[in-house]
Each structure stands twice: as C-alpha cells, then as structure tokens.
Image: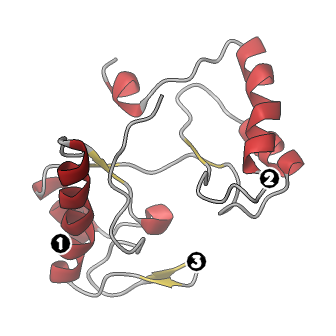
Amino acid sequence: MFEIENHGWLHRPCSVNGRSVYGIKGTANSGEVFEEVETNGQKIERLTGRKPKYYRSGTAYYDEVALKIVEALGYQAVGFSILGDKGATYSAAQVKTALLTAGPGSIIICHMNHPEKETAEGIIAAVPELKKKGFRFVKLSEYHLR
C-alpha cells in the first residue's frame, strides 16, 4: 500500500541559506542540505534494503541550489498539490473537504503519524466519494510510470 521514501532527517525546508518556512528553520548551506537528505536516505536503505527514489523536504520547500543537490544525490524532488490535514490540525470534516478538491494527478499530503488527531476519519469519509467520482489511488512510482 505504501512506498517508503525520503522526507529528510530533521524535517527541514531545503535551502542553502536557512530560509524558514511555516516557522521551521531551513538548512543553512549545501553541507546541511546533503546531511538532511542523505542521513535519512541511508537509514531508509539500511532498514529496507532499498534506496529511496523520491525526496520531499519538510514543508516541501526547495531553493534552486538545494534542488540541484537533491537531484545530484539521485532523488526526484516532489511536492504536493493538496494540503490534506494541515499538519494534522484539521478536523475530520476539514480533511474530507480538502480531499474532495482533488483533481486528476493530485498529490495529497496527510500526516498519519498523529493517530490521536482526526486525519484518518476525514480520509475514511472522503475516499468513497472520490471513488464514486472515478478516482483511483496509486503509488507515486506507479503514477510516474505513465
């Protein structure tokens, strides 16, 4: 059901100047970009036996230099098109509403790492309606094969 990919070691925006996004301080230079990406990538590879293909930084922010570093390390940088649960702060109704804005090719981000929040309930409510509209759910690698 899931692919384990790279979301960074410390969940930081990916920049070479420390840019802060959503109040989270970004990486400050190319060395920190490398460490943010590769420390987690290597850990995932040790645990799963597979090097991740995709990387999404904390906040999905990249500056142009950091993006070049990510790509030079062999990752495809990705973002998202729908903020599904706003960092697990949305109610179930807000999650459902957000997901129902999906269009073809949408990438939805939700935070399953907060089971005490209402993200799961919102997803459970939205998925049947999306399926009725003809949507199907695929892994990122399956979508990119097209």
Is tag 1's residue or tag 2's residue first in the polypeptide sequence?
A: 1
Mark 1–mark 2 Cα distance, whole angstroms, equals 34 Å
The disc labelled 3 sits on which kind of residue?
Tyr
Q: Position of residue 145 (x, y in %)?
A: 30, 21
Mark 1–mark 3 Cα distance, whole angstroms, equals 21 Å
Report helix, strand or loop for mark 1.
Answer: helix
- The structure residue drawn at horizontal position 17% and vertical position 42%, both measured from the top left corner, is 49
**As drawn, 17 above or below 111:** below
The disc labelled 1 sits on which kind of residue?
Phe
Q: Position of residue 44 (x, y in %)?
A: 26, 53
- Please name whichever residue, 109 or 17, is drawn nearer the observer in this view of the structure: 109
Comparing labels 1 and 2, the label whose residue is closer to the camera: 2
Instruction: Name the residue carrying label 2.
Output: 118
Is tag 1's residue or tag 3's residue first in the polypeptide sequence?
A: 3
Q: Position of residue 34 (x, y in %)?
A: 17, 72
**As drawn, 115 above or below 98:** below
At label 1, counting other C-alpha atoms closer than 10 Å, the crowd grade (few under 14, some 14-19, many 20 or more) is some
Comparing labels 3 and 2, the label whose residue is closer to the camera: 2
The disc labelled 2 sits on which kind of residue?
Glu
Q: Position of residue 139 (x, y in %)?
A: 43, 29
Residue 68 lies in what quarter of the image? bottom left
Residue 101 lies in what quarter of the image? top right
Is tag 3's residue or tag 2's residue first in the polypeptide sequence?
A: 3
Q: Is residue 64 left or right of residue 80?
A: left
Mark 3–mark 2 Cα distance, whole angstroms, equals 21 Å
